Image (tube, rainbow, N blue to C red):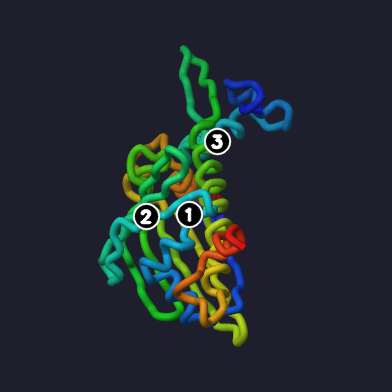
Amino acid sequence: MSGSLEVRAARRYAASASRVYEAFTDRELLAKWFSPSADVELEVLDFDLRVGGGYRFGFRYDSKYDVVSGVFKEITSPTRLAYTWTWEPLDPHAGIETLVTVELSDLGDECEVTVLHERFPDRETRERHDVGWAGALDRLRTANGEEQGLERQRQ
Amino acid sequence: MLARMGMCSAGELGRPFNISQPTASKHLLVLERAGLVRRQIQGREHRFQLEAAALQEAQDWIGRHSAFWEGTLSRLEQVVEADEEEAGEQIDTRDRGRHS
């Protein structure tokens, strides 16, 4: 296991990579599909598609409304898109900055989409000694390294 | 063991595995530095407990985001695989099914 906590998802579509890329980058198209189920409605609050530009998505479900926002890190048509992803208060995961990387592969008749969503040990996680799994794994590795270093010195 | 029994000393934790108290203490120190166990000192006795919240939070995050992307990527199909002439206008196949 690497130091970061991650989720991966992949799927193939009978469509061209440019068609799929458009679905990820056109705010009107996004509003039609970008949510985990038909019951969850996406409201695109901001969508400034340029590196360094920001986005904000509101997800409405029954009486719940969760907002996620982030900044575009990489925009390469039609193969790759990377953006940070941080839930806003009062979400249970609010304030945890994560990174989403969407990769599109043209397989001739099909397009494969791979999403990697990762949490990484940030400075705050490392400093807050008692919180954060990613930071914990990081410290576990460091602590193990120190132990092994000590063992080697003793031998 | 920590999950089942709550708080234990290094000696108690090592005994079922034939691990000496000093060796168990060394391993516990590594886990403590990683934020996965917490040490409580009562007089001369050091007792350890699991940082269950850190583990639970990680599990919740994975479950939520895994479900999010699985659901979202399955909904993408109706948009990108819509018929060419319909693309851009009548994309939502759910609505089409409901009205026909």
- The part of the image, by quadrant, that contains residue A74 is bottom left
Gap between marks 1 and 2 measured at Cα? 30 Å
Do the residues bearing badges 1 and 2 touch, measured as CB atoms within 8 Å?
no
Pointer 2: what residue?
A43
Pointer 3: what residue?
B26
Residue A143 in view here: no
**Secondary structure beneath disc 3?**
helix
Residue closer to the observer: A149 or A155: A149
- Tell me the residue at 42%/68% (across/down): A29
Q: Amino acid at mark 2?
A: Glu
Q: How many dots with numbers?
A: 3
Pointer 1: what residue?
A4
Query: Which chain does the numbered disc 3 sit on?
Result: B
Residue closest to the far top: B43
Q: Is residue A120 above or below residue A105?
A: above
Q: Amino acid at mark 1?
A: Ser
- Tell me the residue at 57%/51% (across/down): B67
- Tell me the residue at 34%/58% (across/down): A44
